[in-house]
Amino acid sequence: MLGKIVELIRLTATELSPDILSALKAARSREASYGAAQSIYDRILANADLAKEESIPLCQDTGIPIFRVNLPEHESAQNVHNILKKAVKKATKLNYLRPNAVDTLTGKNSGNGVGIGIPQVEITRWNKDYSEIGLMLKGGGSENVGAQFSLPDEDINANRDLDGVKNCVIEAVYQAQGKACPPYFIGVGIGGDRAGSMKLAKEQFWRKLKHSHPQLRDLEEDLLVKLNQLGIGPMGVGGSTTVLSVKADYLARLPASYFVSVAFTCWAFRARFLTIRRGEYTYE
């Protein structure tokens, strides 16, 4: 299995999935011909082609590897966790990943991509007869511009309702001002406690389908329009597309709290899945 996980890492780090490529190409087509924004998209797409062709990382910041694993009851979670760590070390040695694990107290880089809390691994049991391993590579730039709000917030006229949530998300993207390499993908977590709210925001990056709740679906669609009216554009040079996707979800909350968390990923949205079924391996 080790080699298959290393291949999952290679694919995630070096090849954008077809839906992300399609979104970037569509965004390019919306920009003025020969303008700065269209030129940025041309470079992004050329970069993606070169990374795939040469099997080299899409970005110099290969991010924190975040594994989301679903296992049948009979599989050993500890064994899978150990294999994932070994795969990260091997992928780092092969230069699919940059050595990204720095000890926070000493400032020393481990040199092999593994440290306390890196990679991040979440393992869940399910009642299916196959395993699914998802990998997301989350860069530091997009982490730096993530934001959290506690409502009400008078400074941005945000009350404890979905209009207030919209104001929070717009404020977060506006304050980013082109940092972290837009066009962005945005995840929004509403409610819960501080930690749960941000965790929920990041979990939206795994979701491809529109939300089934009509209010949240409308929220996502309205925010996508409003965020692109900011005119920040790719890499902050101005343009009609600042955000490619908005996904939001909510948790129950305490009466005293109303948190809104906003998570970002850059244009190099790197997420892939590996399905293991009866000895066969399928990548998506």
Image (cartoon, helix red, strand yellow):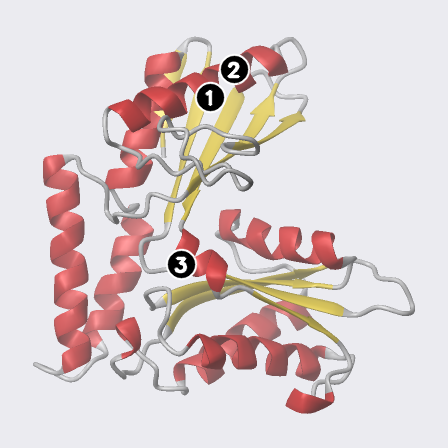
Crowding near pointer 3: few (<14 within 10 Å), some, many (20+)? some
Q: In the picture shown, does residue 58 fall above or below 27?
A: above
Quarter of the view holding residue 96:
top left
- Which label sits on residue 82? 2
Determine the secondary structure under disc 1. helix
- Which label sits on residue 255? none
What residue sits 23% from the left and 41% below the top?
A: 57
Q: In the picture shown, does residue 17 fall above or below 185?
A: above
* Quadrant holding the N terminus: top left
Q: Residue 135: x, y in percent? A: 44, 35
Residues under numbered marks 3 and 1 in contact, where contact means CB atoms less than 8 Å apart: no
- The amino acid on which the numbered mark 3 sits, given as a three-letter code, is Gly
Quickly name the residue at label 1: 85
- The residue furthest front is 106
What residue sits 48% from the left and 79% below the top?
A: 175
Using the numbered discs, state the Cα–Cα distance from disc 1 to disc 2 in whole angstroms. 5 Å
Quickly name the residue at label 3: 141
Using the numbered discs, state the Cα–Cα distance from disc 3 to disc 2 in whole angstroms. 28 Å
What residue sits 70% from the left and 58% below the top?
A: 197
- The amino acid on which the numbered mark 1 sits, given as a three-letter code, is Lys
Determine the secondary structure under disc 2. helix
Q: Earlier in the sequence, mark 3 or mark 2?
A: 2
Q: Residue 168: x, y in percent? A: 62, 78
Choose between 188 and 172: the one closer to the eye.
Answer: 172
Q: In the picture shown, does residue 22 fall above or below 133?
A: below
- The amino acid on which the numbered mark 2 sits, given as a three-letter code, is Asn
- The residue furthest right is 255
